[in-house]
């Protein structure tokens, strides 16, 4: 039996791809007889085999103060304090492998292992992604072929890596809401029932998620515009995004908010299309979420979005003004129940935990091989 520590400092405090993946991964693997897995997280409640560790959360005033003082940033402070809280558990329980997604954590654990002579292996899930070399970590999970190819070209041995994409928790069959049920749910969520809804689930920023581009593209559509719903973590750039939306869109035509992970399904069910405006993602796990509800996904055309969405994606050059605008018009005219079922099946067969569960077990077992 392989003793696994699955760790994520933001889980319980932040809603990002890393956090949702880590929680789902734990639930998918916790009943596997070959694994003894414990989840360590930075917030929420401790439960059976799920342990909350003391840390300075990145959004706390103290983490921000210490981050400025050290010039490392609040995220570094969160990671460091979280990892130091993990050390007693490592000493007492002696895991075979520690499975993580944050490079800062991996670096600290490598230094600690070198200093103490402990024998745990370090398995890095490269969803960011980070670029090689990966000499401090024992095994690398590459979530898309382009990352594996790049690492091999940089000299990383193939046997040190596993190509295992992110999994998604989803039903085997898509449940499509009736027109009446969809209208009722929209009213419950205080969303209009007379406009198509364009949904984006991403951190509310300009630099990476490029919500400013999305707002400008929606504003160019003929009136009445589709309703733009932007759900994500509030960040330093969020005020600029809100200001731009207020400038270019009518108040009744958009909404920006943060939603708990257990509530996000309702918004996917009432939306008509999903957009991720970023020019690059390590994987883009929100694509899986959107497709699992049958939504058409509009994305910038690059290797990872092509890998995830395959023939079911709608691709454009989001560096160009007007590219997304034309895509939206096409997509809204083509959406029907058959296409929803096809998208759902595509993502279920390739990325559902039901289908790729065993690949994770094999990867964890491989990570402890000498």
Image (cartoon, rainbow, N blue to C red):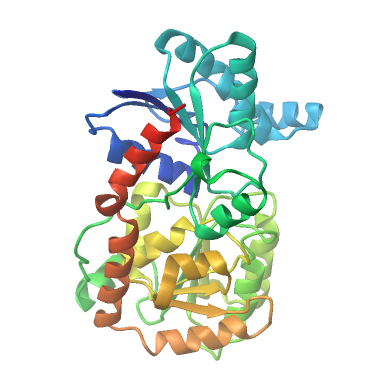
Give how far across and how far down residue 280 sits, in percent. Answer: 61, 63
Q: In this rendering, does residue 187 appear at all?
A: no
Q: Quadrant of residue 341?
A: bottom left
- Give the residue drawn at x 61%, y 84%: 323
Give how far across and how far down residue 223 sits, in percent. Answer: 53, 89
257 vs 279: above or below: above
Give how far across and how far down residue 106 sits, in percent. Answer: 59, 30
Q: Quadrant of the N terminus?
A: top left
- Give the residue drawn at x 44%, y 33%: 367
- Image side of residue 295 versus residue 75, left or right: left
Q: In this rendering, does residue 285 appear at all?
A: yes
**Which of these two is toward me, 184 or 160?**
160
22 vs 43: above or below: below
**Which of these two is toward me, 76 or 348?**
348
- Give the residue drawn at x 42%, y 21%: 96
What is the tally of numbered marks visible in this picture? 0
Give how far across and how far down residue 338 sits, in percent. Answer: 25, 81
**Which of these two is toward me, 291 or 106?**
106
Q: Quadrant of residue 196?
A: bottom left
């Amino acid at each position: 039996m392989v003793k696994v520590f699955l760790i994520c400092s933001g889980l319980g405090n932040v809603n990002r791809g890393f956090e949702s993946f880590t929680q789902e991964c734990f639930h998918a693997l916790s009943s596997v007889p070959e694994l003894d897995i414990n989840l360590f997280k930075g917030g929420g409640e401790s439960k059976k085999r799920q342990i909350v560790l003391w840390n300075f959360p990145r959004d706390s005033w103290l983490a921000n103060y210490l981050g400025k003082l050290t010039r490392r940033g609040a995220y570094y402070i969160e990671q460091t304090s979280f990892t130091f809280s993990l050390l007693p558990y490592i000493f007492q329980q002696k895991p075979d492998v520690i499975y993580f997604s944050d490079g800062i954590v991996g670096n600290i654990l490598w230094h600690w292992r070198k200093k103490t002579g402990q024998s745990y292996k370090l398995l890095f899930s490269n969803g960011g992604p980070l670029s090689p070399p990966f000499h401090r970590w024992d095994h690398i999970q590459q979530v898309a072929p382009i990352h594996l190819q790049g690492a091999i070209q940089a000299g990383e041995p193939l046997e040190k890596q596993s190509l295992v994409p992110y999994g998604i928790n989803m039903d085997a069959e898509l449940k499509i809401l009736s027109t009446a049920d969809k209208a009722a749910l929209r009213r419950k969520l205080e969303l209009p029932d007379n406009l198509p809804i364009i949904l984006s689930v991403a951190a509310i920023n300009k630099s990476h998620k490029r919500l400013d581009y999305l707002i400008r593209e929606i504003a160019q559509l003929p009136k009445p515009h589709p309703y733009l719903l932007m759900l994500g973590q509030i960040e330093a750039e969020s005020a600029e995004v809100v200001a731009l939306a207020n400038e270019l869109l009518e108040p009744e035509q958009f909404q920006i908010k943060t939603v708990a992970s257990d509530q996000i399904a309702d918004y996917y069910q009432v939306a008509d299309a999903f957009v991720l405006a970023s020019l690059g993602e390590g994987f883009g796990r929100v694509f899986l979420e959107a497709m699992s509800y049958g939504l058409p996904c509009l994305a910038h055309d690059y290797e990872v979005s092509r890998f995830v969405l395959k023939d079911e994606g709608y691709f454009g050059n989001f560096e160009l003004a007007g590219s997304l605008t034309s895509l939206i018009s096409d997509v809204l005219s083509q959406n029907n129940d058959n296409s929803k079922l096809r998208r759902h099946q595509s993502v279920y067969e390739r990325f559902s935990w039901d289908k790729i569960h065993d690949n994770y077990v094999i990867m964890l077992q491989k990570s402890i091989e000498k």
